[in-house]
Structures are given as C-alpha cells and as structure tokens.
Amino acid sequence: MKKWFIKSISLISAVFITALSFTGCGSTATTSANAKEASNEEATGVTATKIRVATQPGVYAANILWAKKNGYFEEELEKLGYSDIEVTWDSFESGPPENEAFAAGEEDIGLIGDVPLLIAKASGQNTVTFAKLSAGETTVALTLPEDSDITDSAQLKGKKIAYVKGSYGQHFLGLVLKNAGLTFDDIEEVNLPNSDIGNAVASKQVDAGIIWEPGLTATLATGKIKVLLDGTGIKSNNVFFFATQSFADENPDALIAYIKAVERANEDIKNNPQQVAESLTEEINLPAETLEELFVKYDFSTYISESDIEELKDVEQFNREQGFAENSVDVDNFVNLQYLQDAGITGK
C-alpha cells in the first residue's frame, strides 16, 4: 500500500507541475498568410498549415479516435476550403503526459476531464473549452468488496477509501460524501492510480474505491467487488475538448471542422456500434464485444448544455476548496459556445 501511495503522490505532483507550466503558453501551430486560395480570400478562418491533435486511448474518446481513423477532420477542413493542412495525431496514456506536451507547445487541440481541465486553467493555462467529448453517469462508481456490509454512503465515515487525487473521480466522491453529510475529513484517503484501485478493493486493502471505465467493468467481472452507487443523478462525468487560446483565435474554422468531424463519428457509433468497436479494438486495447457494451454507457455529443456549465462551476469551487487551485476561473468566459453554434450544434 505504501508503494502505491508514493507512486500516486508522484503522479499528482506531476499534474500540478505541468499545470503551472502552462502560464503564458500559446499555440505554436505553423501558420501561413496564404493558407487559402485567392478566390477564397474572404474566408480567413484557418491560418495554420499544420494542426496538432492530442488524443487518449479510452472508451470515452472513441468518437475522436474513429474520426481520426476515417479522416473526418481532414474532410471537414476540405469542405470549408482548406485542403493543404497537415493534421498530426498524438496519443497519450493519460492527462499528465498530454499536459506536458501542451506545456512544451507541441499540441493545439486536446481532451481532458473537468477537474484537471479547471486545475490547469486556474494555474495559468491559456486555453479555451469549445466542445464536449463525452459524458456518462454510470461510467464511474463507488465500489466495495463483494462481501462488504456497507449499504449506505453514510456508513463510509471512518473508512479507508481509494481514489485518484485531482480527478473527476475525486469530485464524484466529494459529492457522495456531501450528500451523506460527510466531508473528506471524515474518511481515510488513499491516493491510487485508477488501474490499481480495483485490486485494492477486491483484496480489502481499502474499504471502498472510486473506479471508472473500463476498469470498472473489468473488475466487476471478477465477482470480487460490487457497486454501492454510481454517478446517476450525482455527476455527469464530462470530458471536454480544449484548445490553446491563440490557436482558437487564429483558426476558428478549424475548431468548427473539428466539431463536425466528431459529430459524424458520434452518428457512426450510434448507428453502427459493432463496426466501430471492431475497428477500434487495437487502439483502445479492449475486445470488440466489451467496447460495444461500454458504448451504451456514454453520451457521445459535442453539445455543452447549461447544466454542464453549472456542473463546471461546481467543480471550479470544489477545486479551490480542496486546495487544487488558488485562483478562480470564470467558467462562463472559459467555455466558448460560439464554435458549437457556428458548427450548427444547438442541442443534442
């Protein structure tokens, strides 16, 4: 347990260091004043000749991974008249290494969960949130050993609970505790990677743990853990797309094309889930059958609702209360809905 705890502290420290290094960082996308042909001089919505996109190999990112595989982003750029733009794709196992790449000026568009998104912004990251990747209330859960006698969240008082510090899982746990009249001071906190929490719960090294997909489904399949409650009615578990502010300012049409590409992928997942799952098994590293089952747990939509914004405001306050951020974030200004509107996305 001590080894896991030290490993986890190192991981969250890296997140904070990376977030701080964003200060003053802008996009370094290769630009050209002649990106468009003379016949389209009035359309100056993309100045970049190279666009760098960061992805992650998770089920929650299946839509952008499918869009990448099919060249949807490039096709949508061409529809807007931008045919000579190079798009590069970089895959990151998790948020910290992706954030490091942004800090080094190596990426233009990325994706991340709500808690680390706002931690980085509060620490000086010069970015804008322009669309949503996915959401899923049942994709995160508070789990217990299979034979645990805990039946109500109020019984978590004094218990040892594992979670990933600085993640949307911690915010979910905070909401669960709050609903039970408890705080983090009422429990024994254990900071572990998501991949280790299932084993910690199953082996009873902790009394409970917050796990998200695909680890949740995989660990439940062992029969050694059970779910006390998931995020239903508690937390949406939103993952968002963001871009450096300078890239967004100089390339608004690129973000519009990006949104349209993701929406095409969303439709494919909805209408042909088996085909998409079979195609993404290698990239996400899960069997096609498992992927298809997990797709139904996610809401793949770029639309950002008023309730999403209100939840972000709640997360922003939570981050400050937990000491993740000293500075506040104006969520209404941080989330720019204009790109969705220009892409024709006005609802689900």
Image (spheres, rainbow, N blue to C red):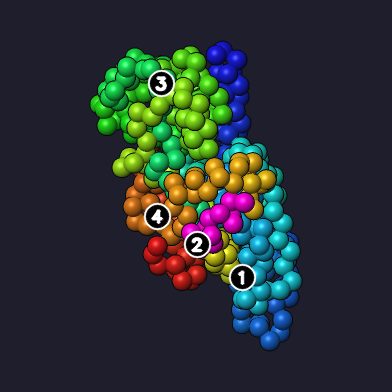
Task: Give the quarter of the figure containing the N terminus.
Answer: top right
Looking at the rendering, the stretch of residues picked out in magenta corresponds to 267-278
Label 3 SS: loop
- The earlier-in-sequence mark between 2 and 1 is 1
Report crowding for label 4: few under 14, some 14 to 19, many 20 or more residues within 10 A (C-alpha): few
Name the residue type under label 4.
Answer: Asp
Q: What residue is drawn where x is 46% and y is 25%?
A: 223
Give the mark count: 4
Marks 2/1: CA distance?
20 Å
**Number of the front mark, 2 or 1:** 2
From the viewer's side, name the closer residue of 28 and 136: 136
Marks 3/2: CA distance?
36 Å
- The earlier-in-sequence mark between 3 and 2 is 3
- The earlier-in-sequence mark between 4 and 3 is 3
Question: Where does residue 31 sit, x and y in percent of width and height?
Answer: 72, 65
Q: What residue is drawn where x is 74% and y is 71%?
A: 84
**Number of the front mark, 4 or 1:** 1
Marks 4/1: CA distance?
28 Å
Residue under pointer 1: 76
Marks 2/4: CA distance?
34 Å
Query: Which disc is residue 271 wearing?
Result: 2
- The earlier-in-sequence mark between 3 and 1 is 1
From the viewer's side, name the closer residue of 310 and 119: 310
Query: Which disc is residue 332 wearing?
Result: 4
**Image-quadrant location for residue 260:** bottom right
Residue 83 in sight: yes
Question: Where does residue 296 sit, x and y in percent of width and height?
Answer: 45, 49
Query: Which disc is residue 146 wearing?
Result: 3
Q: Where 150 sits versus 101, above or below? A: above
